[in-house]
Image: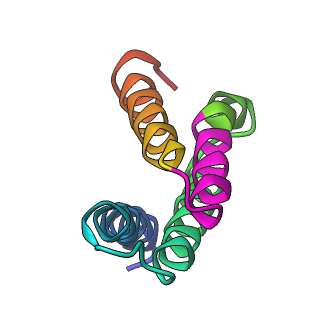
Amino acid sequence: MKKQIPNILFAGGMLLITASALMFIFTARQSALAPYILSAGVAAIVIFHFLTASQNSLRRYFLPVLALFAAIFFMFRQQNSAILMLFIAAILELYYAFRVKD
């Protein structure tokens, strides 16, 4: 069970981030709840990185987490740049998942 907690955090965080992005894009008046859902999802992802990464590999997650924090900022300001920051964070996470070895 203890090994499943980081996986549950990661999956739950990504689901919350996806839900908030969809709410932000597809609601007629941009939802006031979407930034808070995004914040909860990013918090879950940051906790996941701290639980699973070694001390040396924490530096490589700095840029994706920084892009996620920028997405939170832009989403609270109701700017469409939030979606661009989410895209950049997703591309960086994908790159680090497949190209960088621990």
Q: Pick out the residue farthest to the top.
A: 99
Quarter of the picture holding the N terminus = bottom left
Left of 97 or right of it: where is 50? right
Q: How is the image coloured?
A: rainbow
Q: Exactly how many numbered labels are in the figure? A: 0
Q: Is 69 colored magenta in this rendering?
A: yes
Q: Residue at x 66, y 47 (%)?
A: 70
The quarter of the picture where residue 39 lies is: bottom right
The extreme front residue here reads 29
Q: Residue at x 69, y 35 (%)?
A: 62
Image quadrant where residue 20 sits: bottom left
**Where does residue 99 sit, x and y in percent of width and height?**
39, 16
> Which secondary structure dominates the residues rendered in magenta?
helix
Q: Residue at x 56, y 62 (%)?
A: 78
Report the span colored magenta.
64-79
Q: Is residue 41 above or below residue 55?
A: below
Residue at 57% over, 37% down: 64
Q: Picture coordinates of residue 72 (x, y %)?
A: 61, 59
Q: Where residue 48 appears, x then y in whole percent?
A: 54, 60
Left or right for 13, reference 71: left
Asked if residue 97 lies left or right of residue 35, the reply is left
Magenta highlight on residue 8: no
For this view, does 68 lie left or right of residue 5? right
Q: Nearer the viewer, residue 10 or 102?
A: 10
